[in-house]
Amino acid sequence: REMFRPGYAYKKAGVILLDLVSSSFQQGLLFEEHGSLRRRQFVNAVEEAASHYGTGGAFWGGQGIGKQWRMRREMRTPRYTTSWNEIPVLKG
């Protein structure tokens, strides 16, 4: 199916899907769950979308979006593990 339709205003958006794994890496269950066929169909659909749109077109949330996460160091004390006097105190 074609997804793009001329004449519509589009915005880039993202969808977060949690607790999903590729069907080739999914651990089997001793007793198959009732909804497992539906889950397999969903996983296959996501993998098909990824192969259709190429690298980065569709991916699992655990893969991230490629930006390196960095800790904000400007608020960190130089001796955050050894000096009790430098631990921030909150008052309510």
Image (spheres, rainbow, N blue to C red):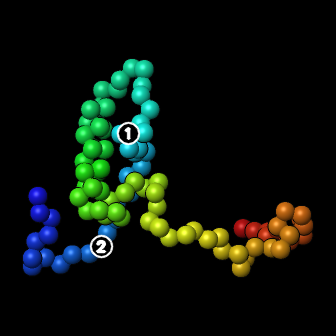
Label 2: few (<14), some (14–19) or many (≥20) C-alpha neighbours in 10 Å:
few
Which residue is identified by label 1? 24
Q: In which quarter of the image is residue 92?
A: bottom right
Q: How many labels does the image show?
A: 2
| Above or below 17: residue 71 | below
Which residue is identified by label 2? 12
x then y, percent, for residue 56:
36, 64
The answer to which of 73 and 86 lies nearer the viewer is 73
- At 44% from the left edge and 65% from the top edge, which residue is drawn? 65
What secondary structure is found at the residue carrying circle 1? loop
Compare marks 1 and 2 and give the one earlier in the sequence: 2
Report how far apart the C-alphas of labels 1 and 2 lie in the structure.
Answer: 29 Å
The answer to which of 14 and 1 lies nearer the viewer is 1
x then y, percent, for residue 87:
82, 68
What secondary structure is found at the residue carrying circle 2? loop
Using residue 82 as the reference point, say whether residue 73 is left or right of it: left
